[in-house]
């Protein structure tokens, strides 16, 4: 009886941890569902209304949102881990210093990115060359869109820090609600802009601009509701040791994010440079269908990162191991079923969705489906290693894999077309990253027996 009572607090902590994971996943599903509906409705409309080059540019810009995840210099992910630790230790002062120092770093990062774009405008003979081959008639529209994108990204870098704070506090349901509100606004704005034949930069404002505004509003509401900075002296928020710690951890996450961007989000760069914007537009349509599967999985995994971090901080390794194994199995099973369904029905989906005779190559669908399954299980491994602060070893493996994948894309894309781009990533990840993950898990759990 006494033993049962002694274990009760631990069981309650575990139950609350799982409940927060489920709450985050549920809210994220609501938000991502709204985003998915926006994609399903607006892509056919945009493909019909826009010039193929402009449509390809819009698809490229939306894809580059993932590529620019590293633009916060890795500070956001460092903040997430430190907020989790501060919450576990109930250290309010540490929480204030982490967020204050994090905002200082991300504001500087946003300004540096904006200055880099201004320098590119002044020094490059053809600033739109980053978007691939663009015809002279479309250069002004593409240049305006890229400039709008650069400004919004520079603002969004510090604005998205609130998401890391919310996740680290295991209040990720705020993110889902913000995404839902942004999806509703985008769902109204994009069709209207296409209907009135608006400019490409206006579509950027209706998507990334709405997201940025939503993050800013969420920041104000969440910080005030939780009274995060109440009683703090503003001069003490940017704390030297905390700032240096965030920069140190952030540099590791930055290297990891750059590697991930080169490996996974560089398809837009390679395809537009090798095959043109029109080819990337068709590829992006098919890719987004498979990315919808990844989006659903990432919503479920969103709360696991801080949950793993909390469990490891409390030395609850039994819970961490059990949830890791079950998550790997569930992610693999779900991704396999969803990907096979997409491969078998892709022709019917594209013909009824896009209302055109466009039929994606079977080879592309098979490779995308296989990659979706591998990526799903890799995402589970990634959130566990991030929560466990196993960043340095990830960086080593990821850089090696990313370099191999990026080089492979330039070789295989001219030979196999868009299929070669995805195949290069799949081969590099399977040969390098998968064995690396087995090695990390074996050593991590072996040292804690």
Image (cartoon, rainbow, N blue to C red):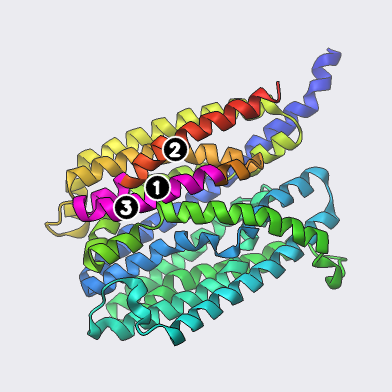
Q: Position of residue 38 (x, y in %)?
A: 37, 61
Residue at left offset 21%, top offset 38% = 344
Is residue 402 a member of the stretch shown in magenta?
Answer: yes
Q: Earlier in the sequence, mark 1 or mark 2?
A: 1
Q: Position of residue 186 (x, y in %)?
A: 42, 68
* Residue 7 visible to the viewer: yes
Q: How far is the residue under mark 1 from the one under mark 2?
A: 9 Å
Region in magenta: 396-423
Residue 300 lies left or right of residue 343; in this view the side is right
Q: Earlier in the sequence, mark 3 or mark 1?
A: 1
Q: Which residue is mark 1?
A: 404
Label 2: element kind: helix
Q: Quadrant of residue 305?
A: top right
Screen quadrant of the N terminus: top right
Q: How far is the residue under mark 3 from the one under mark 1?
A: 9 Å
Residue at left offset 58%, top offset 32% = 440
Residue at left offset 71%, top offset 34% = 312
Q: Which residue is mark 3?
A: 409
Q: Check contact, mark 1 vs mark 2: CB within 8 A.
A: yes
Quick one: label 2, few (<14), some, or many (20+) residues within 10 Å? some
Residue 123 lies left or right of residue 228; in this view the side is left
Q: State the residue lying farthest toward the left.
A: 357
Quick one: label 1, few (<14), some, or many (20+) residues within 10 Å? some
Is residue 414 a member of the stretch shown in magenta?
Answer: yes
Residue at left offset 32%, top offset 60% = 270
Residue 256 lies left or right of residue 101; in this view the side is left
- Would you place residue 408 above or below residue 107 in this image? above
Q: Which mark is residue 432?
A: 2
* Residue 164 visible to the viewer: no
Q: Quadrant of residue 16?
A: top right
């Amino acid at each position: 009886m006494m033993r049962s009572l002694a274990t009760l607090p631990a069981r309650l902590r575990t139950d609350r941890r799982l409940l927060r994971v489920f709450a985050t996943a549920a809210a994220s599903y609501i938000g991502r569902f709204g985003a998915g509906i926006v994609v399903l409705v607006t892509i056919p409309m945009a493909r019909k209304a826009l010039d193929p080059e402009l449509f390809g540019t819009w698809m490229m810009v939306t894809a580059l949102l993932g590529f620019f995840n590293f633009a916060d210099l890795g500070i956001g992910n460092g903040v997430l881990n430190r907020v989790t630790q501060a919450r576990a230790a109930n250290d309010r002062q540490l929480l204030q210093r982490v967020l204050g120092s994090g905002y200082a770093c991300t504001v500087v990062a946003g300004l540096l990115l904006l200055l880099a774009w201004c320098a590119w405008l002044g020094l490059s003979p053809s600033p739109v060359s980053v978007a691939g081959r663009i015809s002279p008639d479309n250069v002004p529209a593409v240049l305006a869109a890229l400039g709008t994108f650069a400004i919004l990204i520079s603002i969004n870098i510090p604005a998205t820090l609130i998401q890391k704070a919310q996740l680290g506090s295991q209040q990720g349901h705020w993110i889902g609600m913000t995404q839902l509100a942004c999806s509703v606004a985008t769902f109204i704005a994009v069709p209207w802009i296409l209907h009135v034949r608006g400019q490409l930069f206006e579509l950027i404002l209706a998507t990334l601009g709405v997201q940025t505004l939503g993050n800013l509003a969420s920041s104000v509401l969440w910080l005030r509701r939780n009274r995060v900075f109440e009683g703090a002296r503003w001069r003490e928020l940017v704390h030297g040791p905390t700032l240096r710690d965030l920069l140190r951890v952030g540099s590791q996450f930055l290297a990891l994010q750059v590697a991930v961007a080169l490996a996974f989000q560089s398809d837009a760069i390679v395809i537009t440079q090798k095959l043109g914007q029109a080819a990337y537009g068709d590829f992006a349509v098919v890719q987004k269908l498979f990315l919808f599967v990844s989006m659903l999985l990432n919503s479920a995994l969103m709360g696991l990162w801080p949950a793993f971090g909390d469990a490891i901080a409390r030395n609850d390794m039994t819970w961490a191991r059990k949830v890791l194994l079950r998550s790997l199995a569930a992610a693999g099973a779900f991704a396999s079923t969803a990907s096979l369904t997409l491969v078998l029905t892709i022709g019917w989906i594209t013909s009824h969705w896009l209302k055109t005779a466009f039929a994606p190559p079977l080879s592309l669908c098979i490779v995308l489906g296989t990659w979706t399954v591998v990526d799903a299980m890799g995402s589970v491994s990634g959130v566990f290693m991030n929560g466990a602060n196993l960043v340095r070893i990830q960086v080593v493996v990821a850089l090696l894999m990313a370099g191999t994948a990026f080089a492979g894309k330039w070789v295989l894309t001219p030979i196999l077309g868009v299929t070669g781009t995805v195949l290069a990533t799949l081969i590099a990840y399977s040969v390098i990253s998968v064995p690396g993950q087995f090695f990390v898990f074996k050593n991590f759990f072996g040292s804690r027996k």
